[in-house]
Amino acid sequence: NNLQQKLNSLREHIKQCVPQAKEKISWSMPTFFINTNLIHFAQHKNHIGLYPGAQAIAHFQDVLTNYKHSKGAIQIPNDMPLPFELITKIIKFNLDKNSN
């Protein structure tokens, strides 16, 4: 179905951003990991949740105004396209933060 395709494209996008990352299940969610968790994601009833950590969300707060978000989560409504450019920036932020 459409949501499954969307999740698969999200996973493929993350794999392209960080091909060296290990994939695992953490907190019952698909997770990409290098030394620490880079990003988790999960399908919910009305949205896909992205869980990049509180520091990443704080850093990108000004560009997250179109999305419902909390200290640890970003909600991408099912009827909105995935913001691949933003996802790439968040992953690179977490990579840089983790390598210091």
Image (cartoon, rainbow, N blue to C red):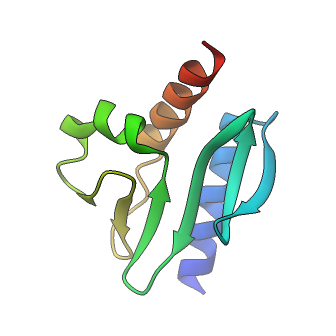
- Quick one: 64 or 37, which is closer to the camera? 37
Relative to 24, 40 lies left or right: left
Left or right of 67? Residue 81 is right
Residue 39 lies, in percent from the top left, at 58, 48
The one nearer the camera, 81 or 14, is 14
Identify the residue shown where x is 78% and y is 39%: 21
Where residue 48 sits, quadrant-wise, is: bottom left
Query: Farthest residue toward the top?
Result: 100
The residue under the point 39% across, 57% down is: 73
Image location of residue 24, percent across then percent down: 79, 57
Vertical relation: 57 (above or below) 95? below
Q: Residue at x 46, y 45 (%)?
A: 53
Residue 10 in percent (x, y) is at 59, 58
Frontmost residue, 94 versus 2: 94
Whether residue 36 is situated above or below residue 27 in the rendered picture? above
Residue occupying the point 66% across, 35% down: 17
Q: Quadrant of the C terminus?
A: top right
Q: Quadrant of the N terminus?
A: bottom right
Q: Quadrant of residue 96?
A: top right
Along the horizontal axis of the image, is 39 left or right of 22? left
